[in-house]
Image (cartoon, helix red, strand yellow):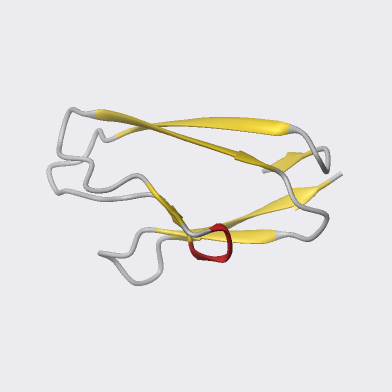
Amino acid sequence: LSAAAGERVRIEVTNNDNMSHDFAVPALDLNTGTVHPGEIATASFTMPDEPVDFVCTYHDGMTGRIAPR
C-alpha cells in the first residue's frame, strides 16, 4: 500500500474469515480493536514521511507496510 506523505488515509477492513482479527499500526498508536467475523472496521490516519508497518496483533505473520509516495 502507498499514500502521499501528509495525506489523510482511511482504510476499511472487512473480516471475511471465521476468526477475529484487528488492524494495528503500532508506530501511529492505532488499532481498530477486535473485528469479529462478518464485521467491518475503519482506521484513519495522516500518512507520515516514513513507511509504517501494519499488523494483526492476534496472528503472527499477518503484516504489511504502507509507504509514502
Q: Quadrant of the C terminus?
A: top right
Residue 11 position, x and y percent, is 51, 32
Q: Residue furthest right?
A: 69
Q: Residue at x 12, y 42 (%)?
A: 18
Q: Is residue 41 above or below residue 33?
A: above
In this view of the protein, which residue sits in the foreground, 59 or 42?
42
Residue 49 position, x and y percent, is 83, 55
Q: Residue at x 36, y 58 (%)?
A: 56
Q: Quadrant of the N terminus?
A: top right
Q: Residue at x 40, y 69 (%)?
A: 61
Q: Is residue 20 above or below residue 53?
A: above
Q: Residue at x 69, y 31 (%)?
A: 8
Left or right of 54 on screen, residue 40: left
Left or right of 68 on screen, residue 12: left
Q: Quadrant of residue 9?
A: top right
Left or right of 57 on screen, residue 36: left
Left or right of 46 on screen, residue 5: right
Q: Is residue 21 above or below residue 59?
A: above
Residue 35 position, x and y percent, is 23, 41
Please count the marks in the image.
Answer: 0
In this view of the protein, which residue sits in the foreground, 33 or 35?
33
Q: Residue furthest bottom?
A: 60
Residue 34 position, x and y percent, is 21, 47
